[in-house]
Image: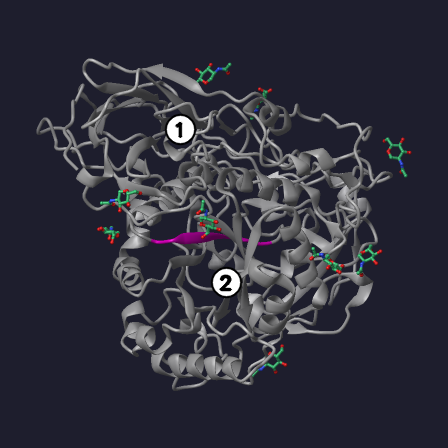
Amino acid sequence: MRATVLALGSLSLLLPAAHAVTVYGQIPFGQTSYLASSTWTGEGPAPTGAGDSYTKTLAAYDETILNPPAPPQDFNAAYTIHLQAKNASVGGLSIMQHGSFLGFSIEMSVATQLMGKNASHIQVPFLNLMAQIQQRAGGVHIRMGGNTQDFAYWVEQVDNHAATSKEKSDPKNPTLTPAVLYTDELFHLAANVSSLVNVRWYLGIPFNDTNWRLAVAQKGQAILGDHLIGLQGGNEPDYYLGHGHRSEPYGPTEYANEFQSLIKAIQDDPLVPIKNMLIGPSLASGPWNPQQVWDTGYMDRFKDSLVAVTMEHYPSNNCFVAFNVGSYVDPQQTFPNFLSHNAGLNLVEPYLASAALAQQYGKPFIMFETNSATCGGLPGISDSFGAGLWALDYGLTMAASNFSGALLHVGGQNVYYNPFTGAVLRFLFSYGVHGLTKQLTVAPPTNQSVFNQWTVGAIYYSVIITAEIFGHSNVSQIVDTTNAATPATTTDKGGNSIFTPSYAIYDNGALRRVAMFNFVDDKSGAHDVVGSFSVDGGDMPEQVWVKYFLGDSVSVKTNLTWAGQTFGNKFKVDGRPKGDLNVTKISCNTGAKLCSIPLKAPSFALVFLYDPEQPDPLLGGSGSGSGAGDVVTFETTAFTKTVNTATVDPSVLATSNGQSAKERAQLGSTSSGSVNAAVGRAVVPGLAVLGAMLAGAGVVMAALVR
Ligand SMILES: *[C@@H]1O[C@H](CO)[C@@H](O)[C@H](O)[C@H]1NC(C)=O
Ligand SMILES: *[C@@H]1O[C@H](CO)[C@@H](O)[C@H](O)[C@H]1NC(C)=O
Ligand SMILES: *[C@@H]1O[C@H](CO)[C@@H](O)[C@H](O)[C@H]1NC(C)=O
Ligand SMILES: *[C@@H]1O[C@H](CO)[C@@H](O)[C@H](O)[C@H]1NC(C)=O
Ligand SMILES: *[C@@H]1O[C@H](CO)[C@@H](O)[C@H](O)[C@H]1NC(C)=O
Ligand SMILES: *[C@@H]1O[C@H](CO)[C@@H](O)[C@H](O)[C@H]1NC(C)=O
Ligand SMILES: *[C@@H]1O[C@H](CO)[C@@H](O)[C@H](O)[C@H]1NC(C)=O
Ligand SMILES: *[C@@H]1O[C@H](CO)[C@@H](O)[C@H](O)[C@H]1NC(C)=O
Ligand SMILES: *[C@@H]1O[C@H](CO)[C@@H](O)[C@H](O)[C@H]1NC(C)=O
């Protein structure tokens, strides 16, 4: 791609350091009720005194606010990228991408907490959050697994009619997560979710030893049918030796031989009729590098069994704080590492050759588990607006580098990085280090139901936005246009800098959308950017439509908006966007064929070359990747637990594929706190959807995972 910079001047202003605010968190529901209703059920002596662990805020609700990094000294406040109207003239375009590019990896131990206690008790906010993605992308990919999958085992039944339970803590497990026990109900839960929203599942076959236990494969295939899209064989095998799950020698060769043995076991098992949906090698940047696995002949040996090639990676960690392992990572010092395009580039670089190899074999290459930092994420970073920008840019960088997808890991209430955190009225909170697990049962402080007490992290918005960027046409290609610009003067840093990455997105061969970031935090306006693009070989539209992703600063966790709408601050989320949709129209200079988009510091803009609220005529009116499509919302009749049913308007389900934008807007936009009357709505037969985890509903694990 050819591009030049129209530098309007390099800014090197000295700005006062941003005002430092460090707020330490409050107890989720208020300290008094939390303490009053808690009972110690853990091993060992109960924590004594005030303070101590009782008053520790769960990580998911942590209120640490870091200082935004100082703005860069040299910075292009204006740039121009020259884009081509047709994909034929563009070098290095990606493979065809899809709106379900970013999905989720849900730790097995928290699956019931997030999705529902059992198949007849599904969490309404979860359905709503997934429906938002389905509206834009047509579907959502979720992996149910993680560290817990290797030791999990099937049992006929668990207590309290739930889909999962847990056994006593396993000291061998790297993250102290106790083994998960699951029943058929877990698969029914997933199947019932899929019958309501188009969620497609990845599961993991336990790989803790080679006495292959294939219950997950058998039941997954039988119960989920074509909603099951892959079975992982080995999770982070490069850590098996280090974590004591294997003994010497254990390297890529031994792992590959075990993978072969798993394939054999599946071939021999008539209860696993689909033999070729395996996923590997899922390395975690441990002691092995990908090339060592390819050198075992992995692709040639296993290409007929593999449905996708996978890796797992987190750019940072909080393991010292969580487990006293490694060295301390200081969130404040680390924050800037997340706030430039280099973050994404550095993350994909080790995998470029593997992505190309997978493409050569016709396999999707998926970042199977990722997030900002392993061992629970970093306070102040993982749920900040900055992390939202980071995850979005990282996702687009992966897409532009021919990855086929990436799954953001979701843990319990004791991690910082969740895209969404379920409200749980009564749960058993396990915490601990060095093999000592303490448990705290927390009862609800009020009789408010859980329906609108969920919390979303900024990275949930990244998933929604990515879904909108690629849509559901399957004919979208993306190219990274950052630094595609030639420096116009010797003083500027070359095109749109690492702080202002940009991308061009083509549908069916035609330029349709442009994505632009400003990672810099500066309320003064001195680092606001004007990002311009020209269109060569085609018409510049008279105007463009822009949706902004906005937050007050990279540090904040509240009042985030996407196109004017918010999912709500913590404990305020029911899974539906609130507020009026705001699509900003910007006139372009058709004579000069130049369109200029203002980008506040910080912000992200998605520029549409057509009205995103109308079906894209270029795609035969079939939807565009713009949010065209319809959302089914799962509305609750009431917010108190005295009425704990939720309803789905059957007419909404019935018309879910043919509504106008106006009807969509009504469905998708609710005012905060509004309660939809039950009048005229029917409980969907056979589906008493309600918030699970009501008091007495049993035990939910909040395991510290990954
Ligand atoms: C992605 O794949 C396409 C099609 O094979 C190729 O043209 C392009 O160069 C690849 N991009 C990268 C970054 O490897
Ligand atoms: C693998 O996990 C299963 C189920 O938790 C357990 O019964 C078995 O002993 C484990 N194998 C090893 C070698 O730890
Ligand atoms: C699901 O949980 C509810 C509430 O505890 C219980 O009444 C119901 O029997 C459970 N369903 C199954 C199939 O266990
Ligand atoms: C929903 O779950 C129940 C078990 O609770 C199961 O009998 C039923 O088949 C499931 N429905 C779907 C559509 O998977
Ligand atoms: C629930 O809360 C409402 C309002 O705070 C109160 O009037 C009602 O009695 C409570 N119900 C129960 C069962 O505690
Ligand atoms: C796009 O791809 C997805 C996933 O591979 C598939 O389910 C869907 O049917 C495809 N959509 C179209 C319009 O081809
Ligand atoms: C351009 O897009 C068309 C339609 O989607 C596609 O068939 C073609 O392969 C693309 N060309 C390149 C160079 O990516
Ligand atoms: C969030 O927005 C609301 C409504 O606009 C405002 O009252 C509140 O002060 C804002 N909160 C923060 C932390 O900016
Ligand atoms: C819509 O968004 C633009 C850009 O952020 C803003 O200038 C404008 O005030 C917003 N309009 C409304 C009605 O909120």
Magenta span has 404? yes
**In this picture, is 631 found above or below 94?**
above
For residue 156, the mark is none
Where's residue 28, x and y in %? 68, 41
Please tell me whether the stretch drawn in magenta is mainly helix, strand or loop: strand
Sequence-first disc among 2 and 1: 2
Which quadrant of the structure image shows residue 5?
Answer: top left
Residue highlighted by disc 1:
617
Answer whether residue 377 is visible to the viewer in this image: no
Quarter of the rendered image showing ligand 8: top right
Looking at the image, how many numbered discs can be counted on the residues? 2
In the image, the segment drawn in magenta is 403-411
Residue that extends furthest to the left in the rendered view of this protein: 490
Residue 613 as seen in the image, left or right of residue 691: left
Residue highlighted by disc 2:
324
Viewer-proximal residue among 273 and 335: 273
Label 2 crowd bin: few (<14), some (14–19), many (20+), radius 10 Å:
few
